[in-house]
Amino acid sequence: MHTRGRRLRFTAVLALTVLTLTGFSTGRHHSHSRHGSSGGGGGCSSSSQDHDTSTSSGGTTGGSTNGSTHRSRPTYRSTPTATSSATARPLKDGTAVLKRCASLDDPYSTVEVRNPNGREALFTVKVAYKNSNGSTLADTTSQVSVPANGRATLRMAAASTGILDRLDHCEVDPRATADR
């Protein structure tokens, strides 16, 4: 009879240990709680467990109150995102390359604009229309939106069709100014 009593006690202690380690409560009321409420409750949603991950110092801790063990989960702090810092960074100017000069047949100059920035940007491009002496007959500016780290082709109308019969060549400002 003495051996049977020890077996029952051992089985009870073993069952209580398994329940405690797996997070289940025995239904006892506890006097200690991080959230200020007392009482056990069953299953994994016991109020004696610490579910507040924003104020815990991290790691898994163990303690004992009234014979039961309380464990808390490791804490994970959120990492700051870089949403506002990306928009605050100033834009770099792009590059402009003349692909085709305006002519009597087609009064538009074609310019390729490249964006070195990691976000879409608006660029201002300037083309000068020169005669055979190198004097500027007229110049035009235009804007184009270019995707992040991409390129766009811009067709710019000549300042006036009256200059096309005296036009010798076009010169584009190699710097496309970032506007936003």
Image (tube, helix red, strand yellow):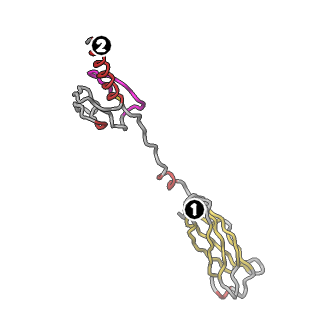
**Could you tell me which residue is drawn at 37 percent across and 25 percent down?**
62
What secondary structure is marked by label 2? helix
**Could you tell me which residue is drawn at 61 percent across and 70 percent down?**
152
Q: Is residue 49 left or right of residue 180?
A: left
Give the alpha-carbon distance from disc 1 to disc 2, as whole Å.
79 Å
Label 2 Cα neighbours within 10 Å, binned few <14 / some 14-19 / many ≥20: few
Residue found at the very far front of the displayed protein = 1
Q: Is residue 61 left or right of residue 89?
A: left
Image coordinates for residue 10, horizontal then vertical, percent: 32, 19
Image coordinates for residue 141, horizontal then vertical, percent: 60, 74
Seen in the picture, residue 7 relative to 148 is either above or below; the reply is: above
Q: How many marks?
A: 2
Q: Nearer the viewer, mark 1 or mark 2?
A: 2
Residue occupied by mark 2: 3
Precedes in sequence: disc 1 or disc 2: 2
Q: Which residues, given as a range, are shown in magenta?
A: 56-69
Q: In the image, what residue type sits under mark 1?
A: Ala
Image coordinates for residue 140, horizontal then vertical, percent: 62, 77
Residue found at the very far top of the displayed protein = 2
Q: Within the image, what quadrant is residue 32 found in?
A: top left
Of 68 and 83, nearer the camera is: 68
**Could you tell me which residue is drawn at 57 percent across and 71 percent down?**
144
What secondary structure is marked by label 1? loop
Q: Which mark is residue 4?
A: none
Q: Within the image, what quadrant is residue 113 found in?
A: bottom right
Residue 60 sits inside the magenta stretch:
yes
Q: In the image, what residue type sits under mark 2?
A: Thr
Image coordinates for residue 173, horizontal then vertical, percent: 67, 69
**Could you tell me which residue is drawn at 76 percent across and 77 percent down?**
134
Residue occupied by mark 1: 148
Of 79 and 95, nearer the camera is: 79
